[in-house]
Image (cartoon, rainbow, N blue to C red):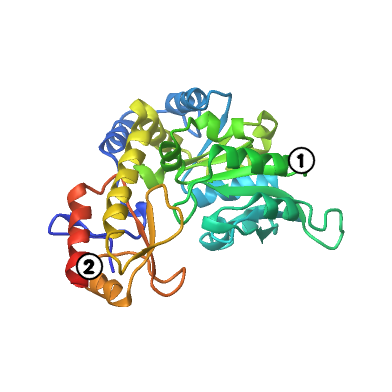
């Protein structure tokens, strides 16, 4: 399977990572390539991104651009977790499944403890129990941080009220709260919430701010709402190899991403493509819609002949992680209505 384009039609639904870059971001990179700039984040564009992030989140912030979401998660979690600590994550969390031990590497050994709940979301009851489990026991890792994935890996979204409740539970138990916001924009537009409402106002201490899945090339960021973390984040950012000498290239992407609400427009489009796909797939009795996807992910069950038939026609999507027949289709800002319609036509043809 490949995430390529056949006859001008996008057939890739493996991940929104497979989409290219928004034209505005490509143009910003071209502009950044001209002339000279101060190195290591002291350039004007990086300073502008910091100010723009503060406006977006309606709060003073410290911003650390990084090259990958895994680096953002690892460095952020290391700042919030001692080596003898534990990171509370849903079993479907990206940090638990798809980062090859990055959090453990950056924290020098902190343990990821799985905290379950339906629709890939941690429940208050499960978090309340995990947050105090073996607290003070010298023989056990100590719960240190709760990490919430927004939007979740199966497309579900924590509501603002849910984030607030989970953050209160964590803080009352002495834990910090980290948000893996790789698809933050998709969650924001799904809930019609503001960035402030979904993050620091709901109790989030540090955010991994995703842009790569939603139109950037190679740029994400750590956004901290707690100034007491600034110094440690700065050193961990450098020590983690993410303080690039030409930081302005990453900052230029983030600057363009936030300009004229490009990030929200891209996410709204991606969510709309998922809803178009979801609504029409649900019309087929052979297809069972699963979970509560509200962002740019369609989570459902296909009969084996449909999976094989679509793969045979060059459509790429995951069908091997959540159980037999369970598929995971991800749309992006790059998908167009005609792309969705070609996939839907293939589904109808195979199902007869």
Please name the residue that numbered disc 1 is placed on: 172
Is residue 93 at all visible to an observer of this figure?
no
Task: Choose top left, top right, bottom left or bottom right for residue 340.
Answer: bottom left
Give the residue drawn at x 77%, y 58%. Answer: 141
Image height of 70 relative to 290, above or below: above
Q: Position of residue 142 (x, y in %)?
A: 78, 54
Give the residue drawn at x 57%, y 28%. Answer: 61
Depth order, front residue of 281/46: 281
Horizontal placement of 115 versus 209: left or right? right
Please name the residue that numbered disc 2 is placed on: 314
Name the element at disc 2.
loop
Name the element at disc 1.
helix
Of badges 2 and 1, the one in the foreground is: 1
Q: How many marks?
A: 2
Task: Choose top left, top right, bottom left or bottom right for residue 85.
Answer: bottom right
Depth order, front residue of 171/33: 171
Q: Position of residue 328 (x, y in %)?
A: 38, 62
Horizontal placement of 308 versus 188: left or right? left
């Amino acid at each position: 399977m490949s995430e390529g384009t056949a006859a001008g039609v996008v057939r890739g639904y493996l991940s929104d990572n497979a989409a290219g870059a928004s034209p505005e971001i490509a143009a910003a990179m071209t502009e950044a390539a001209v002339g000279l700039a101060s190195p290591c984040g002291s350039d004007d564009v990086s300073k502008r991104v910091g100010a723009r992030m503060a406006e977006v989140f309606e709060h003073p912030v410290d911003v650390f651009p990084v090259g990958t979401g895994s680096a953002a998660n690892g460095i952020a979690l290391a700042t919030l977790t001692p080596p003898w600590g534990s990171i509370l994550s849903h079993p479907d969390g990206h940090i638990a499944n798809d980062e090859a031990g990055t959090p453990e590497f950056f924290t020098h050994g902190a343990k990821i403890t799985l905290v379950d709940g339906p629709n890939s979301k941690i429940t208050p009851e499960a978090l309340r129990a995990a947050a105090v489990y073996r607290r003070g026991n010298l023989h056990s890792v100590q719960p240190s941080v709760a990490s919430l994935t927004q939007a979740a890996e199966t497309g579900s979204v924590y509501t603002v009220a849910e984030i607030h409740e989970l953050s209160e539970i964590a803080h009352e138990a002495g834990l910090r709260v980290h948000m893996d916001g790789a698809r933050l924009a998709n969650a924001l537009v799904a809930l019609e919430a503001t960035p402030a409402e979904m993050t620091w106002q709901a109790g989030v201490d540090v955010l991994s701010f995703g842009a790569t899945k939603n139109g950037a090339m190679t740029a994400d960021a750590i956004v901290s709402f707690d100034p007491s973390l600034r110094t440690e984040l700065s050193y961990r950012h450098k020590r983690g190899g993410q303080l690039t000498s030409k930081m302005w290239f990453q900052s230029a992407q983030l600057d363009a991403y936030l300009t004229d609400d490009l990030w929200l427009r891209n996410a709204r489009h991606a969510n709309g493509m998922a809803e178009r796909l979801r609504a029409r797939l649900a019309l087929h009795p052979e297809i069972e819609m699963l979970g509560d996807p509200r962002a740019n992910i369609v989570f459902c069950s296909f009969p084996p002949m449909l999976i094989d038939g679509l793969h045979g026609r060059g459509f790429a999507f995951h069908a091997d992680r959540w159980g037999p027949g369970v598929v995971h289709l991800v749309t992006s800002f790059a998908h167009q209505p005609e792309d969705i319609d070609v996939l839907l036509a293939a589904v109808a043809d195979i199902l007869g």
